[in-house]
Amino acid sequence: MNNPRSHELFTRASELLPGGVNSPVRAFKSVGGEPFFAQRAQGAYLYDVDGHRYIDYVGSWGPMIAGHAHPQVLAAVETTMRNGLSFGVPNALEVTMAEAITRIVPSCEMVRMVNSGTEATLSAIRVARGATGRSRIVKFEGCYHGHGDSFLVKAGSGALTLGLPNSPGVPAALADLTLTLPYNDFDAATGLFDEAGSEIAGLIIEPIVGNANCIVPKDGYLQHLRALCTKHGVLLIFDEVMTGFRVALGGAQQRYGITPDLSTFGKIIGGGMPVGAYGGRRDLMSQVAPSGPIYQAGTLSGNPVAMAAGLATLELIQQPGFHDALERSTHALCDGLEAAAREAGIAFHTTRAPGMFGLYFRDGPVESFADAMGSDTQRFNRFFHGMLERGVYLAPSAFEAGFMSSAHGEAEIAQTIEAARATFATL
Ligand code: PLP
């Protein structure tokens, strides 16, 4: 593509930022080529500095569920920022946010705001360890919970995309405390808990895996994990940084009817501003400082502008039928893409949850991390660039979920399917 301004910016950035970016997957390293630099975004569209327009299925990696630059979110930010950007003392919007989260997600009887999903998951496992007096945690192959040391063990997202699931710099003594399981494997979980259940503080899971493409739980799987955790005194932690407020208003825990002990959030509750949160049972959360001894703090936590953006977004997604419409449009997109691939005779499969989808260049079903890894990544990379040239921006990795927003209407979906039809013909 002809991107002279983006190229010039990326050349300058590459001198000063590792890989030219502030977060790895943005660098397009696995799909090849160079990233484009954003000029602005509106609704379902991203506009780059070279004048191209893209239908955006990344949505800032999840927060933009109501579309970019939604007027109600911008108005809330504008009004709030005029009163000051950060106070360092409590503000009323933090209380409103805590009330909103605990009302929408009943398993969260108390909540603590932080500044990113990574902070939320780090804090949640600290609570699990502090409350149980145990040291080990369990995570799942291909799941990503931010870049905390304990999570960079068989990690998903950029770590997986770049082939770095276990990062240098994580002390072996700490990594050894992280046990891993294959997602959707009932027996493996039972076996591990029988062996080591009494040493495990918490099990953390993306209830729908969005960082190894998009893998949904088999019937009864999350219930199985809930039962194992209860039996062995292990805290069940749902990492809903991606799924929270997206796959249902009350997240995956509402969709699948599970009550975790702790949950983590981010993305949507910041409406595009830097935010995270963790919450859960009152007896656990009340052990967090200053009401209890488990320490966690943040200079900018509960930032008023971030709270305002998040609250405005939460208001938008609580409109009746919001998630049903999101689910319908996700199906319309995925059905259309599958039909276009079939016409072209290309092995292709999609997985879906409301507002999230996975694309695989292989036949289905895709139920495990191993299945997801069986996708033809070279073909995905060619597809990615073909779509980009036709004005559609997909996640620049074969292992990241795509995101829909309420701004993706029939016209955008039809245009995306048309672009896919043309691209499939070239693969
Ligand atoms: N947990 C999940 C499920 C995520 O998808 C992410 C980020 O994509 C994180 C945690 C980390 O969040 P952040 O990037 O805000 O630190």
Image (cartoon, rainbow, N blue to C red):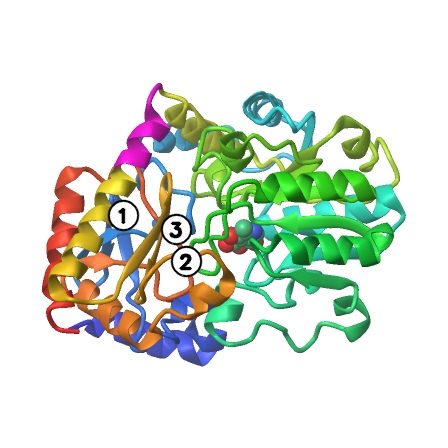
Q: Is residue 300 visible?
A: no
- The residue where tag 3 is placed is 60
Q: Real-space Cα distance between discs 3 and 1?
A: 10 Å
- The residue where tag 1 is placed is 41
* Residue 234 horizontal side relative to residue 421, left or right: right
From the Cβ of disc 3, is ligand 1 less than 8 Å away? no
Indicate the position of residue 81 as horizontal and vertical percent values.
47, 33
Residue type at mark 1 is Ala
- For the point 38% across and 57% down, the residue is 365
142 and 348: which one is in front? 348
- For the point 21% across and 57% down, the residue is 392
Indicate the position of residue 322 as horizontal and vertical percent values.
34, 26
In the rendered view, tell whether residue 242 sits above or below residue 165. above
- The residue where tag 2 is placed is 366
* Residue 262 horizontal side relative to residue 32, left or right: right
Quadrant for the N terminus in the image: bottom left
Q: Are marks 3 and 1 in contact (CB under 8 Å)?
A: no
Q: Which mark is residue 351?
A: none
Residue type at mark 3 is Ser
Quadrant for the C terminus in the image: bottom left
Indicate the position of residue 374 as horizontal and vertical percent values.
41, 70
In the rendered view, tell whether residue 385 sits above or below residue 139. below
Q: Residue 204: within the magenta?
A: no
Residue type at mark 2 is Val
Q: Name the secondary structure under disc 2.
A: loop
